[in-house]
Image: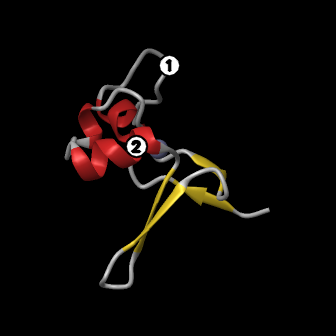
């Protein structure tokens, strides 16, 4: 079973669960669900400001995050 990575939140899950966006330039965006799809396409949210994303957690390093 193939997995795909959500371009918005960075989660990996089985590819049949989410949404694919095929763009005219040939690239593909995968979204894990309508939450990420809408946030990116319709609401133009910054992924660093959406609390459930990987990018947010990297920026706002919470409690047990590793330090360099
Ligand atoms: Zn997602």
Disc 1 secondary structure class: loop
Label 1 Cα neighbours within 10 Å, binned few <14 / some 14-19 / many ≥20: few
Gap in Å between the C-alphas at discs 2 and 1?
25 Å
Q: Residue furthest top?
A: 63
The correct choice, above or below, for 10 with respect to 29 in the image is above
Q: Which mark is residue 64?
A: 1
Pointer 2 residue: 36
Of tags 2 and 1, the one toward the viewer is 2
Q: Is mark 2 within 8 Å of ligand 1?
A: yes
Horizontal side, residue 67 vs residue 2: left or right: left
Disc 2 secondary structure class: helix
Q: Quadrant of the N terminus?
A: bottom right
The correct choice, above or below, for 53 with respect to 19 in the image is above
Q: Give the residue at x 44% y 43%.
A: 34
Q: Quadrant of the C terminus?
A: top left
Q: Position of residue 49 (x, y in %)?
A: 24, 32
Q: Is residue 68 something one can see in this rendering?
A: yes
Snapshot quadrant of residue 2: bottom right
Q: Give the residue at x 35% y 41%.
A: 55
Tell me which label, 2 or 1, sits earlier in the chain: 2
The correct choice, above or below, for 46 with respect to 41 in the image is above
Label 2 Cα neighbours within 10 Å, binned few <14 / some 14-19 / many ≥20: many
Snapshot quadrant of residue 63: top left
Q: Position of residue 22 (x, y in %)?
A: 41, 74
Horizontal side, residue 42 vs residue 54: left or right: left
The correct choice, above or below, for 6 with respect to 27 in the image is above
Contact (Cβ within 8 Å) of mark 2 with mark 1: no
């Amino acid at each position: 079973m193939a997995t795909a990575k959500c371009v918005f939140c960075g989660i990996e899950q089985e590819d049949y669960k989410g949404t694919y966006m095929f763009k005219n330039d040939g690239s593909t965006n995968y979204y894990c669900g309508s939450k990420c799809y809408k946030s990116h396409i319709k609401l133009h949210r910054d992924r660093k400001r959406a609390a459930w994303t990987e990018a947010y957690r990297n920026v706002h390093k919470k409690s047990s995050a590793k330090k360099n």
